[in-house]
Amino acid sequence: MNSTFCPADVISLLRDIQQRSLQSAANASQLDSFHGTWTAIGFRIAQENLLIPLNEAREVFIVPSQISPVPRAQPWVFGIANLRGELLPLFDLKYFLYGQPTKVNKRSRIVVTNNTQLYAGLLLDEVFGLKHFQHEPTLSNTNDETAISPYITSNINQHDMHWDIFSFNKLAVDQRFLNAAA
């Protein structure tokens, strides 16, 4: 069997593949908008499993080995790190909210906020990665007054798992958080 193709056959085959790929992508896009999806980053602090809206996080990275302490700062100010040539202030979110310092381990991560007013990294106990949902979260109407409740905007359930949505934007305007000097 001869399987050589002339250049015109190869170009025709590539055009056919391109056309089918474009059609497939258009169908997938229509399905997503029809069903509606919402994506967030799952994380844990203390015993709380939470979500960060994807648009509120710039990036996630492992805890750097070189962190400079900040003198005369609140104890929840974790330090300053050099992230690709930029100084990034780091804050221990669990220490800020619950008064317990995070025990940094191989699962600990830093999430950089995507807030124009506050460039900061937040130390988290663990990041689970991207979580995809078939619908938008519902507004939170909890009456619980906990340390974390001022930063919870909504919640969502999926596969018998309840997730509260944590807003870094609310944290970024909290005067208690912004006054990091001791």
Image (tube, grey):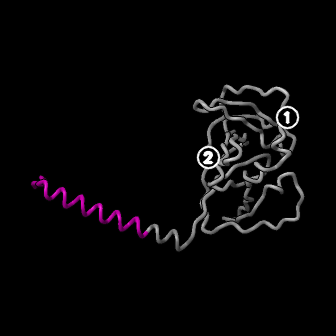
Residue numbers of the magenta segment: 1-27
Q: CA distance from mark 2 to mark 1?
A: 25 Å
Indicate yes or no whether the magenta region holds residue 3.
Answer: yes
Q: Residue at x 55, y 72 (%)?
A: 35
Q: Are marks 2 and 1 in contact (CB under 8 Å)?
A: no
How many C-alpha atoms fall within 10 Å of the one at disc 1: few (<14), some, or many (≥20)? few
> Could you tell me which secondary element the residue under label 2 belongs to?
strand
Give the prevailing secondary structure in the magenta stretch: helix
Residue type pointed to by label 2: Arg
In-front residue for pair 165/127: 165
- Please identify the quarter of the rendering in which residue 126 is found: top right
Residue that carries the numbered disc 2 in the rendered image: 58
Q: Quadrant of the N terminus?
A: bottom left
On the image, which quarter does residue 18 sit in?
Answer: bottom left
Question: Residue 49, percent across and down?
Answer: 74, 53
Q: Looking at the image, which residue is at 70% across and 65% down?
A: 157
Three-letter code, disc 1: Ala
Q: Residue at position x 70%, y 46% from top? A: 117
Residue positioned 62% across, 54% down in the render? 54
In the image, residue 11 lies at what x, y percent?
A: 19, 57
Which label is found at residue 181?
1
> Measured from the top left, where is residue 73 in percent x and y?
84, 31
- Identify the image quadrant of the C terminus: top right
